[in-house]
Image (spheres, rainbow, N blue to C red):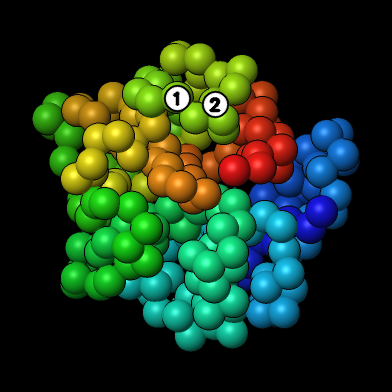
Amino acid sequence: MLTAIIDYDSGNLHSAEKAFQKMAEETGAGSVVVTSDPETVAVADHIVLPGDGAFPACAAALRASGCFEAMVEAVETRGRPFLGICVGMQLMAREGHEYETVPGLNWIDGAVQAITPNDPALKVPHMGWNDLVLDNPHPLLEGIETGEHAYFVHSYQMQMDDPSQRIAHVDYGGDVTAIVARDTRIGLQFHPEKSADAGLRMIANFLAWRP
């Protein structure tokens, strides 16, 4: 078993790499590599797409990377389990509206829009710990309950067209999408590697997922 964390110059991947390696060792899920090699992505059993920064820049960097075609073919054609994290999740949407309208992967029926809390005392970016509210069941959530904490850092969120694809949300002056899923693809708006025991449990569940 091989899990590939795609490196397309989207941020520091050290903490994510260590968290995935830790859980792979504990669960016997094989090896984890951070890679910008399309051949490695093509043969991976699980694929992880992180992302920090603005949607347009991350979308352009991903499409320009040598891994883009290998990732899409592995996920869309061969059905490899996929996990998007933070902007990696947002890129799963139909499009993003950060500074300009930019197409996404169109794997989730939704669009990425600015967070607009209905409480003016709440600041954007949404940064820090928040309680998850589970909306729909998913294997990733085995052992996870409503009220578990996750760590967020973002100013934009995915507005869902299909509520069945929203697996969890948080309350931040209104509902903010936290987890999305469709077919063999799942996305986390928060950083699981920074979300203590709940985040590590989700990483372990993803590594064990055989959809």
The front one of 80 and 83 is: 80
Residue 80 image-quadrant placement: bottom right
Of 140 and 158, nearer the camera is 140
Residue labelled with disc 1: 137
Find residue 35 and report its image quarter: bottom right
Mark 2 or 1: the one toward you: 1
Q: Secondary structure at mark 1?
A: loop
Q: Between residue 206 and residue 172, name the one nearer to us.
A: 206
- Which quarter of the rendering shows the C terminus? top right
Is disc 1 surrounded by few (<14), some (14 to 19) or many (20+) residues within 10 Å? few
Q: In what element is the residue under mark 2?
A: helix
Q: Residue at x 67, y 73 (%)?
A: 42
Picture residue at 19% right of the left edge, 72% below the top: 100
Tell me residue 128's x, y (percent): 45, 33
- Up the image or down, 171 lies above or below 26; here it is above
In screen coordinates, is 57 left or right of 42?
Answer: left
Q: Are marks 2 and 1 in contact (CB under 8 Å)?
A: yes
Give the labeled residue for mark 2. Answer: 141
Residue 90 to residue 211: above or below: below
Residue 202 x, y percent position in the rendering: 61, 33
Q: Please name the amino acid that badge 2 sits on.
A: Leu
> Residue, x 54% and y 73% (percent of image)?
73
93 lies left or right of 63: left
Residue at figure coordinates x 48%, y 75% from the top left? 62
Residue flagged by tag 1: what amino acid is it? Pro
Which image quarter is the N terminus in?
bottom right
